[in-house]
Image: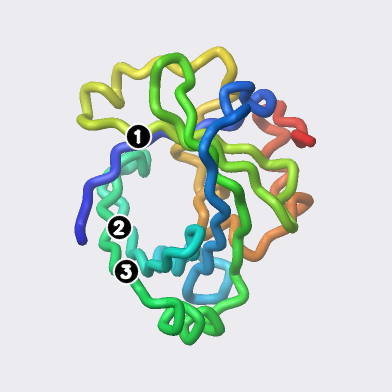
Amino acid sequence: MDSLELERTYLAKRLPEEITGADFVDIVDIYIPDGDGRADLRLRQKGNDYYITKKTVLSEDVSEQMEQTIELTKQEYEALSSCSKKRVEKRRYYAKIDGYDAEVDVFGGDLAGLVLVEFEFSDGKEKDEFVMPKSMLADVTPEEFIAGGMLAGKKYADIEGELDRFGYRRIR
């Protein structure tokens, strides 16, 4: 399935109170290929569902991406998951923040302390006119280091210098 994704990603100032009682799912992402560069092919376990997704950036600020997603069986996912050690673990909460649907990613494992909030939009006008909620610290949509394929396989200490540029402090 192909889909156009219009989104903005923010560093949270704190754990958003809106996630209290919100629905959530645990996610494990594996990025292919291994290596230091950005990986745009992602295996995902989302609860009991499994996918492989190819992302293609469509705009210079990476806020527009084409996603091609194929559902996998658990056996297919497990067979492919040994292809890479670039993994990310997170709990994704689905909440309303300032009236907008938000996905709040609270990272675990080696990236514990990182909290990103993503807002998706139905069209370019809505995305362009969106005003960052006061509970967010900074728009990191264009930041290469924050892309899932770049975060995968890293430790919090590996990105701490980049986060310092925004005044981000580890959220516990």
Pointer 1 with pointer 3, Cβ within 8 A: no
Q: Residue at x 48, y 20 (%)?
A: 97
What colour scheme does the image use?
rainbow
Crowding at dot 2, Cα within 10 Å, few <14 / some 14-19 / many 20+, comes out as: some
Disc 2 residue type (three-letter)? Thr
Indicate the amino acid at tag 1.
Glu
Q: Earlier in the sequence, mark 2 or mark 1?
A: 2
Which one is closest to the eye, mark 2 or mark 1?
Answer: 1
On screen, 28 above or below 35? above
Q: Which mark is residue 71?
A: 3
The residue type indicated by label 3 comes to Glu
Q: Which mark is residue 56?
A: 2
Name the residue located 45 percent from the left edge and 23 percent from the top edge: 96
**Element type where label 2 sits in the image:** strand
**The C terminus, quarter of image:** top right
Residue 140 in view here: no
How crowded pointer 3 is (Cα within 10 Å; few <14, some 14-19, many 20+) is rated as some
Mark 1 = which residue?
120
Instruction: Between residue 95 and residue 119, name the one nearer to us.
Output: 95
